[in-house]
Image (tube, rainbow, N blue to C red):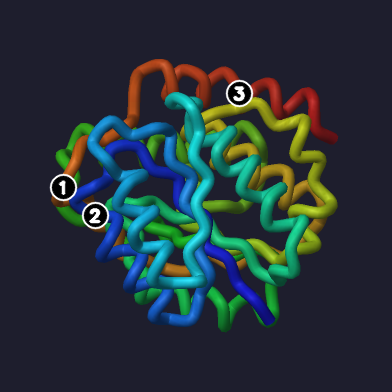
Amino acid sequence: MKSLIIIPTYNEKENIKKLVNQVTELGFHILVIDDNSPDGTGDILEKLKLENEKINIMHRERKLGLGTAYIQGFKWALKRDFDYIFTMDADFSHNPAYLMGFLDKLSESDLVIGARYVKGGGVVNWPIQRKIISRCGSFYARTILCFPIKDCTSGFMGFRRKVLENIDLDEIKSEGYGFLIEMKYRTYRHGYKIEQYPIIFVDRLHGKSKISKNIIWEAIFLVWKLKFRIK
């Protein structure tokens, strides 16, 4: 069974070498999708690739967003013989140590979500305002869409191959929080088994967050589109 970790990057030079090494040491293959980071993230990755056959890189010409990065990554993975496909952030807010637990849970489920808002989960180093926005966002999406996911905006996920094969990836146009909500909801509507795995989310120590007001507003409106469009 082969597993691939997909990691989008933009200006992650402080984190990327350590993260890539930790992930590949666990036996996972990795696909990093870099949006032409001006800080040299792409150059660091090219040097790492020369030393490690588990590293794959996709260079994009400009900053195109989280959603399109993951969709391209999913399509890349499906053209190859990967059985499990994971998504995670590049800033160590998603601890690679959880990956083996995810893999174990995928033996009996179709999607594993790294959940902050279940028993045993939590958030470290976030200001109270961001905690409120995140929790309210998950509650908002869960209530309107009527699906039992406690952490709708988590970006730490593991999919069985068949889930991504049966979702029409070309229909997904959302970004950021909206993309993360949509992938979970489409998986749920297909009837797949979803496991919520408790994680401790630690806010980034290096680099800057990519969250913007536009991403938040997109997610707010997307929830209603999903409610009436996907049956």
Q: Name the residue: 28% across, 38% down.
A: 11
Q: Name the residue: 19% across, 56% down.
A: 124
| Residue placed under numbered mark 3 in the picture | 222
Q: Which mark is residue 46?
A: none
| Residue placed under numbered mark 2 in the picture | 15
Rendering coords of residue 178 (x, y %): 54, 31
Label 1 vs 3, first from the N-terminus:
1
Label 1 vs 2, first from the N-terminus:
2
Q: Within the image, what quadrant is residue 186 found in?
A: top right
| Residue placed under numbered mark 1 in the picture | 206
Above or below for 117 versus 21: above
**CA neighbours of label 3 inside 10 A, class few (<14), some (14 to 19), many (20+):** some
Rendering coords of residue 74 (x, y %): 66, 50
Above or below for 25 versus 15: below
* Helix, strand or loop for disc 3: helix
Quarter containing the C terminus: top right
Above or below for 216 versus 148: above
Quarter containing the N terminus: bottom right
The CA span between labels 1 and 2 is 7 Å
The CA span between labels 3 and 2 is 31 Å
Q: Is residue 150 left or right of residue 41?
A: right
Q: Is residue 229 left or right of residue 49?
A: right
Q: Is residue 84 visible?
A: yes
Q: Name the residue: 77% across, 30% down.
A: 171
Amino acid type, residue under disc 2 in the picture: Asn
Label 3 vs 2, first from the N-terminus:
2
